[in-house]
Amino acid sequence: MRTALTIAGADPSGGAGIQADLKVFEAFGIKGLSAITALTAQDGHAVHAVLPVPPEFLLREITVLLKKYRVDAVKVGMLGTGENAIALAGLFKKTGLKNIVLDTVLASTGGRPLIDEGGAGAVKKLLKYACIVTPNLREASILTGMDIGDLQSMEEAARSIHSLGARSVLVKGGHLAGNPVDVLFDGKRFDYFKGRRLKGNTERFHGTGCILSAGIAASLAKGRGVKKAVEEARERLASILKKR
Ligand code: PXL
């Protein structure tokens, strides 16, 4: 059975993090494995507290799984600490894991940091292992130091993040005004994925980045190419949002 591993934070409210990722893997018909980077206390609206796992323990969680299972794709989400990011970079270098989807989670929508200070710099060390990286506008702006407010600056940010080592970059336009567009850049060409602006509160959109990146990983695990994986993940996300 095709298998994907999520390396992410735990969300007791179930909408984001490993809980969301495992549900997505199941919906794609693949086996889901998980390694928890941090516990959170949250209620679907706001994150109240974060307790990261030490890097040695995170590596232990993963290496135990890798001894037993063949992993076809990996989704990386919230890391909790820069130390965890650096530990993962070392592991990716050693193991040569493929189809790594990097969701550069830096803060919750409510603004609570989901990685410690300086952690964003450590997350950059993971870019060269990523088959695809999926920053939202705020994260793309932090990774590049650019102001991003329109399609042209999204394209420039995608080029800049690609030059940092990620093979494909999906800059998500959900936080732009108007109907959102996601921009995919593979180093050669741009693809544009247009959506419709949906109404709702933070709870409706909680975990959408997690669901999207997990869907991409699941689709890659099934052997699809990057563009097709983004399409399938977006379709799955749209059907989940319809029911919320
Ligand atoms: O959506 C970002 C995110 C990722 N992972 C976990 C989270 C959140 C947002 O709250 O709690 C565990």
Image: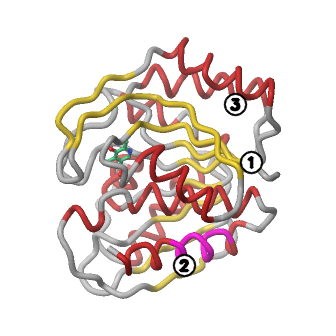
- Residue under circle 1? 3
Residue 99 placement (x, y as % from top left): 72, 50
Residue 26 placement (x, y as % from top left): 62, 58
Which numbered circle lies on residue 194?
none
Q: Is residue 26 left or right of residue 72?
A: left
In terms of depth relative to the viewer, which is nearer, 190 or 88? Answer: 88
Q: Mark 2 vs mark 3: which is more N-terminal?
A: 3
Q: Amino acid at mark 2?
A: Glu
Q: CA distance from mark 2 to mark 1?
A: 20 Å
Provide the residue span drawn in magenta. Answer: 229-236
Q: Quick one: label 2, few (<14), some, or many (20+) residues within 10 Å?
A: some
- Residue under circle 3? 92
In terms of depth relative to the viewer, which is nearer, 50 or 169? Answer: 50
Which quadrant would residue 219 be assigned to in this image? Answer: bottom right
- Residue under circle 2? 235
Q: State whether residue 202 is above or below residue 61.
A: below
Q: Quick one: label 1, few (<14), some, or many (20+) residues within 10 Å?
A: many
In terms of depth relative to the viewer, which is nearer, 166 or 79? Answer: 79
**SS for tag 3?**
helix
Q: CA distance from mark 2 to mark 3?
A: 29 Å
Q: Nearer the viewer, mark 2 or mark 3?
A: 2
Q: State whether residue 138 is above or below residue 5.
A: below
**SS for tag 2?**
helix
Who's the residue at 75% across and 56% down the image? 221
Who's the residue at 28% across and 69% down the image? 175
Residue 215 placement (x, y as % from top left): 58, 62
